[in-house]
Amino acid sequence: MNSRNTADQILVRETNLSSVLRLISHEAPVSRAQLAAKIGLNKSTVSSLVEDLLDRNLIHETGMNTMGTGRPATLLEINPKAGCIVGAELGVDFVAVVLTDFVGNILWRKQVEADPAESLEKTLDQTLALANEAMTVCKDRKLNLLGLGLATPGTVDLNEGVLIFAPNLHWHNVPFRKVFSEATGLKVYVENDANAAAIAEHLFGTARQLKDFIFVFAGIGLGGGLFLNGELYRGKNGYAGEIGHSPILAEAFQNPCHCGNRGCWETYANQYSIIHRVSARLEVKRSSLIPAMLAEQNAPLSIQLIKQAADAGDREAIDSFAEAGAAMGQGLAGLANIFNPEKIILGGPLSIAGDYLLPSIRKTVSKHSLPEIDQQVDIGLSAFGPDASLIGAVAIVVDDILKNPIHVERR
Ligand SMILES: [Zn+2]
């Protein structure tokens, strides 16, 4: 046999190994026979691939399937104890780091206030300090560290692990992978926050069985993760999904955006827009609980406070959320018409106000999308709420291991 054939065979086996692992991830608990049937390989090949994955500790046996008339079969699932993962999220006013097991269960987490727009260096130091704490927790528990994922706003060069441009942080060309891999010695993955959150939702959340969905990361901006035909859609350079900067509202007066343009969709639907809507209402002296709450808490107007007011029945708070929801819905109707998704998932900081945003998002999407498209689309909240991108940072590491299990050593 020539070396070309051998190389081909190794490649085929690696591809099959990944297919079996991903199928177990999405269909678990599942038997070897079920895997063979679904994947179209013979049972002995599948058994050999399963043995390989067991050797790498990536899967484990989880009891027997005694349903049906055949012989009871051993069931397989992803092994949560395959190792742990450090996930880091860079926010506009915080950094958060989490340590999870291999299926995204949180073992440890910490968040600190930060000001990335003020100092890149200081923010990177804060993130590294938290990552080091997480790594110590992992070592103390004698767990295997599988990698570090980083979710950031903005456009990311995936191959180089470089943040190209984050308008809301005012950061350009930050070589995240180089900085973090040199400091930690770990394999480092970098991804846009909304894309990372979409991958988390597909691996661990409310989109496990879905092939076509849109993830909306709503906070200071509106980021999109377009999951199409079973894959995250990245576009030519990996920058696809910058939905918040689409110019959708044609008005005489247009809001300025951090990206430098005017009239971007997100300026009508992000958290600043909600704060501005509330402020404008208070300026015309509408009666509201908010001025008293501001005085009592001695804090600036925030989404948390507006949400508290809404919970207490404050009309101005509720109407401000509803208006922002309508502005979100208008853009989402356009996306629904283009992509015909099965689900639109809202996550990120604004998802804490989901109860007030979702009804008007749904109403506006219904109004502006074609009836047959509107009937198909379910609109709901992320399984991880405001932590969607933090769990996303973990998910990008898990996703790469599911695609390349060969990189995890046998025991
Ligand atoms: Zn913009």
Image: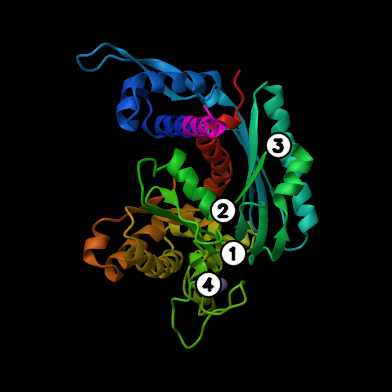
For the stretch drawn in magenta, what is the main secondary structure? helix
Helix or strand or loop: what does disc 3 sit on? loop
Q: Position of residue 398 (x, y in %)?
A: 54, 37
Of all residues shown, which one is farthest toward the bottom?
252
Q: Earlier in the sequence, mark 4 or mark 2?
A: 2
Q: Earlier in the sequence, mark 1 or mark 2?
A: 2
Q: Tell me where residue 146 sits by quadrant.
A: top right
Quadrant of the image containing the C terminus = top right
Is residue 372 found inside the magenta-colored segment of the image? Answer: no
Label 1 near label 4: C-beta < 8 Å? no
Amino acid on which disc 3 is placed:
Leu
Helix or strand or loop: what does disc 4 sit on? helix
* Tag of residue 301: 1
Helix or strand or loop: what does disc 1 sit on? loop
Image position of 190 with respect to 335: above or below? above
Q: Range of the magenta residues?
A: 1-13
Q: Position of residue 271 (x, y in %)?
A: 54, 64
Between the C-alphas of marks 2 and 3, the distance is 20 Å
Q: Work out whether residue 386 can be spotted.
A: no
Question: Where does label 3 land, which residue?
Answer: 186
Image position of 153 with respect to 209: above or below? below
